[in-house]
Amino acid sequence: MPALAKFIFTAIALFIILPHFIRIIKDYERAVVFRLGRVLEKPKGPGIIFLIPGVDKVVMRSLRTVTLDVPPQDIITKDNVSVKVNAVIYYRVMDPVKSVIEVEDYEFATSQISQTTLRSVIGQAELDTVLSEREKINSALQEIIDKQTDPWGIKVSIVEIKHVDLPEEMRRAMARQAEAERERRGKVIAAEGEFQAADKLKQAAIVIADHPMALQMRYLQTLVEVSSEKSSIIVFPIPIDLFKVFMEKK
């Protein structure tokens, strides 16, 4: 009986103490170990790592990609238009040691630098550029934010502007502009059609001038088209030119 009690006591002691000696690190995690206050050069993991209780302190870091939603920012563009712009950022920890010792809270720091960079870049662009050159602005944001977070061991891979919220009066102005643009295009297309039709009529007139009988044939063709309706009664004079050919043969 004393042996059984000793075994149980030992098992309980190991159960309590063992977690302080051994840590299991997942494949997507890394452990930054501080030994007597000094960080080890390389992070530990994945798998089983051994620690010295009371000497080692562990800070965990995830290596998975993080999705950061940048809240809407009130921004005045270069052409003095007030807009609200929000974005989404994808980043991940590339150097766990730097993310621990170079910045106090890398998630909060990345969020703040993303917001300030978004306001700065959009504020230097005109509204038309923000709306039409979205890819160019996304690339500029990604490059600037990645450069700022690189000393923290953070890699920003993607930055995308999600939504640009315009004031109501600006929406109405843009709607009027779009309507005027459509009307302009319609008038241009109609003018081009008139020009092409005039050119074709000019060519037809040249052909008719060289061949007078073509005019008579066209005249008869027009009569056939008009008389297609049975209810129509058409009275027309017969041009003397129709008989001119027969008169010349005599």
Image (cartoon, helix red, strand yellow):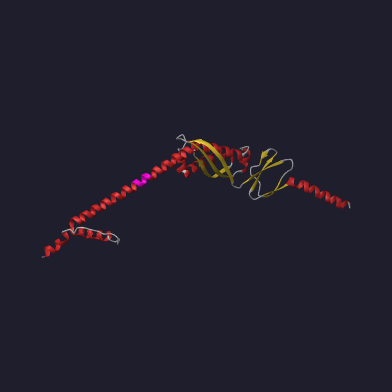
Taking the view exactly as shown, the residue that stands out farthest to the bottom is 250
Taking the view exactly as shown, the residue that stands out farthest to the right is 1
The stretch of residues the image draws in magenta is 183-187
> Is any atom of residue 211 visible in this view?
no
Image quadrant holding the C terminus, namely bottom left
Percent x, y of residue 1: 89, 53
Residue beneath the point at 23% across and 52% down:
202
Percent x, y of residue 241: 16, 59
Q: Nearer the viewer, residue 35 or 231?
A: 231
| Main SS of residues in magenta | helix
Q: Nearer the viewer, residue 184 or 60?
A: 184
Q: Nearer the viewer, residue 182 or 164?
A: 182
Percent x, y of residue 99: 61, 41
Residue 101 magenta: no
Residue beneath the point at 21% across and 54% down:
205
Percent x, y of residue 64: 61, 47
Residue beneath the point at 42% across and 41% down:
176
> Is any atom of residue 164 visible in this view?
yes
Decide if residue 171 is on the left or right side of residue 53.
Answer: left
The number of numbered badges drawn on the structure is 0
Q: Nearer the viewer, residue 188 or 24?
A: 188
Residue beneath the point at 26% across and 50% down:
198
